């Protein structure tokens, strides 16, 4: 679509309120550009006097000293005020000594770790997103605090120093704006503050002071890329509020004539005024809007010394409360359907709640707590038992309060903070983390193990989570494509991630980048870079620019069952219309069966990709069997029947399969397994992931059925002396059930009307178990018994003990069971037509 029709389409979709808002914003920008062209703005310390509210005696004295241009005197007065006032933020400078002692006692290595991280910052070596030891000033050590705040040092490009509204920050010509902005969030100042409190080394406070002065010099009001994003202004303002409370601690502080508090408060006032004038109500009404609102709310509550504070906190609170219903699904998931951006939103509402309580905002506390509870329960559900999130959707590797430098996918600190603020100890995962010590006055110090979290269906967001007590964790995505334009979505319908016994195995390869390379952006968002099926070389959804889509696929879940023995999922998506991709998954401890069905007609090429975590090495032993090993001795097997298996590993200079981006930015090689089958639809592709000490084998078995339109597959899996026979069937007219309850299927000595049946015989005949989905009977010729139910059941697992007796579990009440001895001939087995 050309530019003009696209513009007309966008305008026709806008409401009158949006048109008025955009017109007013445009007018303000034009006026700002004109004023900027006539007179370039500069920082003027004396202007802080008019920004302060003289209600407090110390603030009144500071205002008088500012009027007299006594910067040092004003600074010392402000230091005294903020270092001794009643706390209005999560960090209290007055309790610095006591808090530092508690943290050093609970975490004996914290001081040394904080010093190592802070030393790297002072040396000018920054860990930014997925990059390590970046220098923003070339090779020279940065001991004077000077940094090129507009530089992308990875791609060696620099954003222009023009009016903020004219900075083309999405253009690769400016470099990668994420790499520039991440440093300019100044969240590394929290690391300097932490190190200063825990070690008392004055270098860390001085490093902050030098960097603040350097930034103010390089970023006059309204100039350059660091004024162009309201979210970045908001997140930077939050870091400055942290810094104010870290570095106005007066205990052990030598005399300071730098007047940094004057500069910091003036900078906060100007940046937050810019945010308030340009809130992202229509530009990015998602985490951009809530992040901006959070900054206004926190600043408004924490800094009543500023005249604009009352307006900021009203505006910020209103947005946060309104968006808590609009941006949080019924199951607690964030509407952008990205695990990473969900974590941002959780942290936003946790900080808002903590500040509301600290400042006595009683009206907001219940609603912030309710929003935080829903978000935290969702995060606890989708994360593994140690708090690691699957990297579903976009992941920019950022965080709201990275005090300790934790990986952004590790949400254990946020869950622990939620457990404390919400009085929900079940939300926490072990062990205890340091971050909540900095944010609440009642952290836990013990490393207690919380109860196992159950398998769950997060139906509103479209995620289905299978987990076991031994640390298995599978997440399958069967929801909508994303929020609004799906800016942070991937073409990943029916994709899954899998952790086995606490070791990530099948992963989402990540994000890679946003705007610096369109080819890389589209590759990491494509279907083949996810653990799902591509049909005829197509991606389910077709991208249109870095944050848009030309077409999108919608996932739909038809069945979700969970009982103590296994979990079962079944769903489809419409991305290959008129053909349909259906996926069924049976998950049990140590064994995962994935059935991918292609519905349609005529010859079709199906490719199923499996992306392994880089910690695994993969060896293809024969065409249908792969061994995966870790250095810790863990071994897994991947098998398939009816499909060719290939393994790819990333090579320098190659852009195809075999790569992942563990964090935003650099790609690292890993193993990608591809299963390929070309056949006339409908047909099935089977993937098996199994644990086994000995090499397993997979044998395809002939299937008989009494339905001509049914498509079925059966196989025998042998692993370490155990034998399983699995039979799965569907027919194109199965509708939501995707299976034929009236159809009867037979394979490997089994006969059943179930959609899925697995017979498991353990070594030495200790026991035989049968797992079935949507069925009413099983005839087992190998054990000469039959199981008949009084009515069809959604799911059932029955174990027959060799010494007699049986156990049955299901997600629903189990109807009457009847076992029949087939040897006596009391039940006839009808002859079925071969197919």
Image: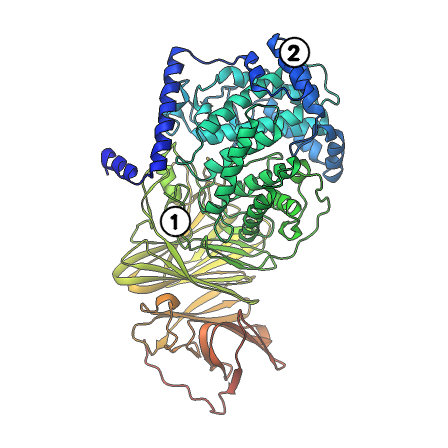
Q: Quadrant of the image for the C terminus?
A: bottom left
CA–CA distance between discs 1 and 2? 55 Å
Residue 783 spot, x, y in % from top left = 51, 81
Q: Image quadrant of residue 565?
A: bottom right
Against 517, residue 684 (above or below) is below
Q: Nearer the viewer, residue 728 or 559?
A: 559
Q: Which mark is residue 516?
A: none
Of callouts 1 and 2, the N-terminal one: 2
Against 413, residue 589 (above or below) is below
Could you tell whether 580 is left or right of 801 in the image?
left
Residue 77 spot, x, y in % from top left = 68, 16
Residue occupying image coordinates x 35% and y 77%: 705
Count the marks: how many?
2
Query: Does residue 201 appear anywhere in the picture?
Result: yes
Residue occupying image coordinates x 37% and y 19%: 31
Residue 711 spot, x, y in % from top left = 34, 69
How many C-alpha atoms fall within 10 Å of the one at disc 1: few (<14), some, or many (≥20)?
Answer: many
Q: Nearer the viewer, residue 556 or 147?
A: 556
Residue annotated with mark 1: 481
Which residue lies most toward the front here?
55
Q: Quadrant of the image for the N terminus?
A: top left
Residue annotated with mark 2: 72
Q: Nearer the viewer, residue 619 or 678?
A: 678
Identify the element where label 2 is drawn.
helix
Residue 230 spot, x, y in % from top left = 46, 29
Query: Does residue 167 appear anywhere in the picture?
Result: no
Against 91, residue 376 (above or below) is below
Judge depth for marks 1 and 2 and give the one in front.
Answer: 2
The colour mode here is rainbow
Q: Nearer the viewer, residue 311 or 149?
A: 311
Identify the element where label 1 is drawn.
loop
């Amino acid at each position: 679509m050309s530019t003009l029709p696209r513009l007309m389409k966008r305008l026709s979709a806008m409401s009158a309120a949006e048109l008025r808002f955009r017109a007013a914003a445009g007018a303000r920008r034009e006026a700002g550009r004109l004023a900027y062209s006539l007179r370039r703005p500069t920082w003027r310390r004396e202007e802080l006097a008019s920004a302060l509210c003289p209600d407090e005696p110390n603030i009144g004295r500071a205002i008088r000293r500012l009027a007299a241009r006594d910067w040092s005197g004003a600074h010392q007065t402000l230091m005294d005020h903020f270092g001794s006032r009643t706390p209005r933020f999560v960090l209290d400078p007055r309790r610095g000594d006591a808090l530092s002692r508690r943290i050093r006692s609970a975490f004996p290595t914290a001081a040394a770790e904080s010093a190592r991280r802070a030393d790297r910052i002072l040396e000018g070596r920054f860990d930014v997103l997925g990059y390590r030891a970046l220098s923003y000033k070339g090779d020279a050590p940065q001991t004077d605090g000077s940094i090129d705040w507009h530089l992308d040092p990875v791609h060696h490009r620099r954003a222009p120093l023009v009016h903020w509204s004219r900075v083309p920050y999405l253009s690769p010509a400016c470099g990668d704006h994420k790499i520039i902005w991440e440093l300019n969030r100044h969240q590394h100042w929290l690391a300097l503050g932490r190190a200063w409190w825990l070690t008392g080394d004055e270098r860390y406070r001085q490093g902050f002071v030098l960097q603040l002065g350097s930034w103010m010099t390089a970023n006059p009001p309204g100039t350059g890329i660091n004024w162009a994003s309201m979210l970045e202004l908001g997140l930077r303002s939050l870091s400055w509020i942290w810094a104010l409370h870290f570095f106005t601690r007066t205990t052990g502080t030598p005399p300071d004539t730098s007047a940094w508090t004057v500069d910091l408060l003036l900078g906060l006032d100007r940046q937050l005024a810019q945010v308030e004038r340009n809130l992202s109500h229509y530009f990015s009404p998602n985490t951009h809007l809530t992040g901006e609102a959070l900054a206004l709310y926190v600043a408004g509550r924490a800094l009543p010394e500023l005249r604009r504070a009352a307006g900021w906190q009203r505006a910020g609170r209103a947005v946060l409360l309104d968006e808590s219903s609009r941006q949080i699904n019924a199951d607690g998931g964030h509407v952008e359907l990205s695990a990473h951006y969900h974590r941002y939103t959780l942290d936003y509402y946790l900080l808002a709640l903590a500040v509301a309580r600290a400042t006595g905002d009683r009206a907001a506390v219940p609603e912030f707590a309710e929003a935080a509870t829903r978000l935290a329960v969702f995060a606890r559900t989708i994360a593994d038992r140690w708090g690691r999130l699957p990297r579903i959707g976009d992941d920019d590797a950022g965080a709201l309060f990275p005090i300790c430098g934790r990986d952004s996918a590790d949400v254990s600190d946020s869950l622990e903070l939620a457990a404390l603020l919400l009085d929900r100890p079940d939300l926490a995962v072990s062990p205890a983390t340091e971050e909540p010590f900095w944010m609440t006055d009642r952290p836990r110090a013990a490393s207690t193990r919380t109860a196992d979290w159950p398998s769950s269906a997060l139906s509103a967001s479209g995620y289905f989570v299978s987990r076991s007590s031994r640390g298995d964790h599978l997440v399958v995505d069967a929801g909508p494509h994303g929020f609004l334009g799906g800016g942070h979505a991937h073409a990943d319908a029916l994709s899954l991630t899998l952790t086995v016994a606490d070791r990530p195995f099948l992963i989402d390869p990540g994000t890679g980048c946003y705007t610096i390379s369109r080819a890389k952006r589209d590759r990491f968002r494509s279907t083949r870079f996810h653990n799902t099926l591509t049909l005829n070389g197509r991606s389910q959804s077709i991208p249109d620019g870095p944050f848009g889509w030309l077409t999108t696929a919608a996932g739909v879940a038809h069945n979700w069952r969970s009982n103590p023995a296994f979990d079962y999922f079944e769903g489809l998506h419409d991305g290959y219309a008129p053909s349909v991709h259906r996926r069924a998954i049976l998950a049990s401890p140590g064994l995962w069966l994935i059935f991918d069905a292609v519905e349609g007609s005529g010859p079709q090429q199906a490719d199923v990709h499996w992306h392994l975590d880089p910690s695994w090495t993969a060896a293809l032993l024969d065409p249908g069997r792969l061994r995966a090993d870790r250095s810790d001795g863990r071994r897994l097997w991947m098998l398939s029947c009816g499909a060719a298996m290939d393994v790819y590993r990333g090579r320098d200079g190659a852009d195809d399969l075999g790569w992942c981006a563990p964090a935003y930015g650099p790609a690292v090689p890993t193993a990608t397994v591809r299963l390929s089958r070309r056949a006339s639809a409908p047909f099935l592709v089977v993937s098996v992931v199994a644990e086994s000490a000995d090499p397993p084998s997979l044998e395809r078995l002939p299937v008989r059925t009494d339905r001509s339109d049914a498509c079925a597959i059966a196989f025998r899996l042998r692993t370490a002396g155990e034998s399983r026979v699995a039979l799965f069937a569907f027919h194109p007219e199965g509708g939501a059930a995707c299976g034929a309850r009236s159809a009867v299927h037979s394979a490997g000595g089994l006969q059943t009307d179930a959609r899925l049946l697995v017979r498991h015989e353990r070594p030495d005949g200790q026991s035989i178990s049968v797992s079935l989905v949507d069925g009413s009977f099983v005839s087992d010729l190998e054990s000469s018994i039959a199981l008949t139910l009084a009515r069809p059941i959604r799911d059932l697992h029955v174990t027959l003990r060799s010494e007699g007796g049986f156990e049955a579990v299901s997600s629903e009440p189990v109807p009457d069971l009847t076992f029949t001895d087939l040897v006596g001939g009391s039940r006839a087995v009808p002859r079925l037509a071969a197919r």
